[in-house]
């Protein structure tokens, strides 16, 4: 319990300090990536289908909603807030505090929990982005550590495709193919 409290407090402190930026335009902190998008994704092994939505609510914060399902009466819903801050001209640090509601027809039946994660997004070139995150998931007395790594190709300013490896998630280890539409 102490570990959960310390992790949650640390993430809340980091996000609060990034959101407490001065409103003076000369001190504006700009992100290197867009956090306004709609995403469609397909997972393999097991086969899942999902969608996500992100909307900037502050120069360094965004709201997130996502859902995934095997289309067998199951779902994995996540919603919450995220923060993002530039490290340099080519990388952002990210974090999310999410409410999770899960019914996977195996371990969870409409159970709620929380996810906290920290990650990084990095430009490798003008159109190639890579990133990853590590997270803590707590649902119904089950605590797990989540990992993901991804690569994303931005074919235009408004559209990108990507591949992601998710490890130790609700549906186990998966490879995801994604299409993201910036608005």
Image (tube, rainbow, N blue to C red):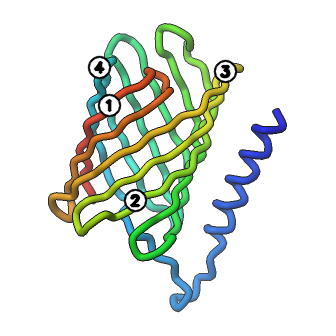
- CA separation in Å, label 2 and label 1: 22 Å
**Front residue (pair 21, 132):** 132
Please identify, in this view, whether the residue under mark 3 or under mark 1 is nearer the observer: 1
Pick whichever of labels 3 and 1 is earlier in the sequence.
3
Residue 108, given in percent of the width and then of the height, sits at 56, 14
Q: Secondary structure at mark 1?
A: strand
Residue labelled with disc 3: 142
Residue 128, given in percent of the width and then of the height, sits at 26, 59
Pick whichever of labels 2 and 3 is earlier in the sequence.
2
- Residue 59 in view: no
Whether residue 146 sits left or right of residue 71 in the image: it is right
Is 161 placed above or below 14 here?
Answer: above
Is 73 placed above or below 60 here?
Answer: above
Mark drawn on residue 35: 2
Is 108 placed above or below 59 here?
Answer: above
Residue 27, given in percent of the width and then of the height, sits at 56, 87
Residue labelled with disc 4: 47
Q: Secondary structure at mark 4?
A: loop
Badge 4 vs badge 1, beta-carbon distance below 8 Å: no
Residue 136, given in percent of the width and then of the height, sits at 62, 37
Occupied quadrant, residue 3: top right
Badge 3 vs badge 1, beta-carbon distance below 8 Å: no
Q: State the quadrant of the C terminus.
A: bottom left
- CA separation in Å, label 3 and label 1: 23 Å
Whether residue 104 sits left or right of residue 15 in the image: it is left
Pick whichever of labels 2 and 1 is earlier in the sequence.
2
Q: Secondary structure at mark 2?
A: loop
């Amino acid at each position: 319990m102490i570990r959960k409290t310390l992790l949650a407090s640390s993430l809340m402190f980091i996000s609060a300090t990034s959101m407490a930026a001065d409103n003076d335009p000369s001190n504006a902190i700009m992100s290197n990536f867009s956090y306004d998008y709609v995403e469609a994704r397909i997972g393999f092994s097991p086969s899942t289908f999902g969608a996500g939505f992100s909307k900037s609510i502050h120069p360094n914060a965004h709201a997130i909603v996502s859902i995934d399902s095997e289309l067998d009466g199951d779902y994995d819903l996540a919603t919450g807030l995220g923060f993002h801050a530039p490290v340099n001209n080519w990388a952002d640090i990210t974090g999310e505090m999410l409410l999770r509601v899960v019914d996977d027809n195996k371990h969870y039946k409409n159970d709620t929990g929380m996810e906290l994660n920290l990650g990084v997004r990095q430009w490798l070139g003008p159109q190639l982005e890579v990133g990853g995150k590590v997270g803590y998931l707590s649902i119904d007395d089950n605590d797990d550590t989540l990992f993901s790594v991804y690569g994303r190709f931005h074919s235009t300013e408004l559209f990108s495709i990507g591949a992601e490896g998710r490890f130790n998630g609700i549906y186990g280890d998966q490879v995801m193919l994604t299409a993201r539409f910036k608005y």
